[in-house]
Every structure is written in C-alpha cells, then in structure tokens.
Image (spheres, rainbow, N blue to C red):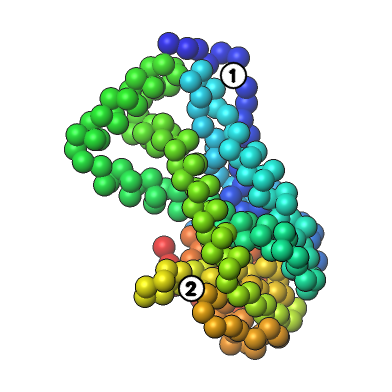
Amino acid sequence: MNSQAGQTKAARRQHYIARFYLRNFADPMFSENLCVYDMDTGRWNKRSSHGVGWFTHLCSSIDMDGRRKDDFDRFLKQEVEDPAAPAIKKLATGQPLDARERSAVALFIALTAARSPRMMEDVMNTYLAKLEPLERIDLDYVCRLWCQWTGRTCGPKMSSEFLKPSSFGAIWLWAQSFRQRLERWDWSEISTTIDQPFVTSDRPVFAQRGDASGTHLVTFPVSSDRALVVVGRGRLKDGSGRTDDVYAMNAQTISRATEFVVASRPSFPADELLKRGLAAS
C-alpha cells in the first residue's frame, strides 16, 4: 500500500465555465464586474469570475501513488480554453473568424456542454445504473483493491473517483465528435442592445435534437450583446435580434440553469423566469 505523504497538490478550484467567457457578460464587458443570480437563494450578488462556475476537483484524478493530479484540467486549458479565448473575444466584438478560430470555438462549446458537474454526474450515474449485477460486483471488487493500493478510504463515491480517467476519455471523444458536427453546420449570429442583454449560466449550451439526424440546432450566448445559433438544416439570417429572439434565448439559458445565471444587469428579457420553481432542476 502506498502512502499519500509528499503528494503534490492539484488545483482544488476547477472552473467548468471558463473565466474569460464569464467576463463577456460583465459590465463593462471583459471586466470582473459580474452580476450573478444564485438559483438556491434567489438573490443577485456582485461577483468576480474567480468565484463563479467552479467545482472542487472536478477534472482531477487520483493516481496509483495516491496523489491527486489535475493533468486533465490543465490539458483542457492548454488545448481548448487557451486557443478559444481570443476567438471568443473576436466573436463577442463582432469580428469574423477564420477556419482555425471557428474550430476552436466549436470545441469550446462542445467542452462547455460536456464538462458541467451535472452532466458528468448524470453520465456516471447512468453508466453505473446500467451495469449488470455481476459487473457491479466486479467493479466494487476492483475499486476496493484500488483504494487499498492508493491509500484511500473506500466509500460510496469512490467508484466514480476510480472511473474518472475513463470518463475523461469519454468527455474528450464526445467533445471532438460534437466539434466536427458544429464545424459542418451553418453559423448565424444574433445581436442585441445593452438594455436588452443576453445572459449566460452554468449550462449555457442549448441543443435541440431532430427526429433522425441527431442534434440539429445549438444556441450559445457569446456575450451580453451577441449570441450564436448553429443549425444543421437551413440557415438563419444574421442581424439584430428582436426582443422576442432575445427573450427566447434567455429563456432557454434560464431553463437549463441549475446553479447560477450571470448577466450584465439584473433586468433583461425573461428575467421574470428566475422566480423560484420556474427554472428546470
């Protein structure tokens, strides 16, 4: 059995919503002045991007020496967030993207959809629930051996911890597949005014599935005044969004939120939907 003594520290606070993205919804844009609605308390608070959209050790794992490592979290920052940051900023300010930048944005959207704690927990629970009784017995046995080897205390959550490296691989493969689909589809932008802003949340990617062809509509708020619509069939016109377009986009964002909503101001189209009980759980 290996000791945890001398283990290197992994970053405890790991953001599943990129900080540079959240700053697109600040006032002024790109600042740290965020207006955050807490879904649990039903209150607005002034926050910075540092304190929003993170989860403890979300993308870290325990190696065979019992040390917690954040290799995957650092990999995602280097391979997804860093390339996407300047491209997202260009999109937020209305500048055209080249093919490389568009690919970086597509991968960022895919990762943002896949990396939320809610999504990761649901996928893990679904996998465990589908195991046959003998498969679950085998998993529990191997997990106990792993806990003994790494010096970790076996408990109800350790199966998920043991399976994390596999789940990281699944996240990466799914994100790559989703990116390829987004790259093939048609992109349109909707813009609005500062007094009718778009908002974002802990789950900002909205995807609607078609009958046979899979997901064929994806919407993503880019900043307070711009949103992206990606369609697999047909094409939407670029241009200024009407109030009902902004309302519909914000309503989709709010309906998916489970932790928080971020806005440049507490007044915006669909803000009445933030009343407790109206947002989807």
SS label for mark 2: strand
Q: Quadrant of the C terminus?
A: bottom left
Q: Residue beneath label 2, please?
A: 216
In the rendered image, the vertical position of residue 244 relative to residue 12, given as above or below: below
Q: Position of residue 246 (x, y in %)?
A: 61, 81
Q: Could you say which quadrant of the image residue 179 lies in?
A: bottom right
> What label does residue 183 carry, if any?
none
The residue positioned farthest toward the left in the image shown: 133
What residue lies at 41% left-to-right and 35% top-to-bottom?
A: 163
In the rendered image, the vertical position of residue 186 relative to residue 130, given as above or below: below
Observer-nearest residue: 141 or 105? Answer: 105
Q: Depth-wise, is mark 2 or mark 1 nearer the camera?
A: 2
SS label for mark 1: loop
Q: Residues within 10 Å of mark 2 (few under 14, many from 20)?
A: some
Q: Residue beneath label 1, please?
A: 7
Q: Position of residue 95 (x, y in %)?
A: 80, 71
Q: Amino acid at mark 1?
A: Gln
